[in-house]
Amino acid sequence: MRSFQVRACGEPLVCIETTTPKPQGTEVLLRLLAAGVCHSDLHIWEGYYDIGGGQRINLADRGVSLPLTMGHENVGEVVAVGPDAEGVKVGDRRIAFPWMGCGSCAVCRREEENLCTSPRFLGVFRAGGYSDHLMMPHPRYLIDYGNIPAEQAAPLACSGVTTYSALKKIGRDVLAREPVVIVGAGGLGLICLSILKAMGGRGAIVLDIDARKREAAMQAGALAAIDPNAPGAREQIVKAAGGALWAAVDLVGSSSTVQLCIDCLTKGGTLIVVGLFGGAVTIPTPYLPLRALALRGSYTGSLAELKELVALVRDAPLPYVPTRVRPLDDANAALADLKAGRVIGRQVLGPGG
């Protein structure tokens, strides 16, 4: 089995060859068909999150240990099953749900494993999909994705379910009536825009500093695409929203983007922060009651939400999101391109590239 591992934070991934494991108990072994390269992988590779004021959260303090095979957006074909694994068979093709918890705490029992305080996330706390094989602990985490192309199905496990969960927190009634601001027009933003359409949303005003990505957002059907750093950006956003902005999803999560969204929201508005770029904001506490603002974080999505999303996409396929399929050996180049901002849409590692 070949895997590309983080051996030292910020250093090139190293290709390691090991014996392909055999599933035991309820385990299921997948041959990887597609593994998405997510922006979160950059934080894991670098080893920290910026929390502003020169401070960092080191991933080692969160229990992330090296060496690590990253990759949490995975699709694979079942090639072997343990003696106690039920519901799947050799040859089945499945999305691997990555946000697994301990399975026994109160959060996990209410099927919100993504919020477990003892997580077992793929590509973070256990080996992920930058490899040619992936071991899953139980068939319950494997989702049939039907006829969706593998390279389009893989990002649903993170980019898709993360944005779907964030949009759900706004509420379908608001989404149907009001335009939503989406901050960021990278792969996450374009998938968010597509899912918003599939959910019957009115549309989105997309913000990005990169003119190429703003153009990609317009081609994907955005109502408007605005540079958040441009003079008069707030006025442009409010005008595009029709005079009152009710909701925003910040997929960047920097100090400036969060503050801009807060400044643009009308009374009673909602901001969902998803991005982990880093920084800090200061909000006068009276703003929350006087403006009735809802400021909420959203972290990935649940197993139930991923099943909902796959059902939604299978019934009404998402508009195409630009996707580049690269061979597994391009893992380092893919990370470098993502870090440099050269990627429009998504990158997926696959066996054939």
Image (cartoon, rainbow, N blue to C red):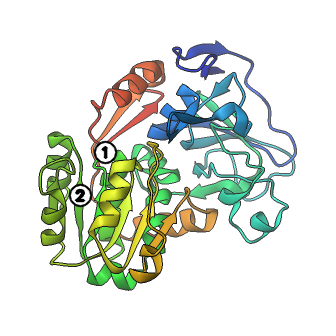
Residue at the image position 77 percent from the left and 28 percent from the top? 21
Q: CA distance from mark 2 to mark 1?
A: 10 Å
Residue at the image position 70 percent from the left and 54 percent from the top? 88
Q: Please state which of residues 52 and 284 is positioned toward the viewer in this rendering.
A: 284
Residue at the image position 31 percent from the left and 50 percent from the top? 184
Query: Which element is circle 1 on?
Result: loop
Q: In x, y percent, where is residue 133? A: 63, 31
Callout 1 crowding tier (Cα within 10 Å): few <14, some 14–19, many ≥20: many
**Quarter of the image holding residue 69?**
top right
In the rendered view, would you say 267 is above or below 109? below
The mark found on residue 47 in the picture is: none
Q: Amino acid at mark 2?
A: Val
Residue at the spot of label 1: 186
Q: In x, y percent, where is residue 107? A: 75, 66
Q: Is residue 210 left or right of residue 190?
A: left
Callout 2 crowding tier (Cα within 10 Å): few <14, some 14–19, many ≥20: many
Q: Is residue 64 left or right of residue 153?
A: right
Q: Is residue 197 left or right of residue 353?
A: left
Residue 193 appears in the rendering: no
Query: Which element is circle 2 on?
Result: strand
Q: Please state which of residues 107 and 126 is positioned toward the viewer in this rendering.
A: 107
Q: In x, y percent, where is residue 139? A: 72, 54
Question: In front of the other: label 2 or label 1?
Answer: 2
Residue at the spot of label 2: 206
Q: In x, y percent, where is residue 304? A: 61, 68
In the rendered view, would you say 103 is above or below 227? below
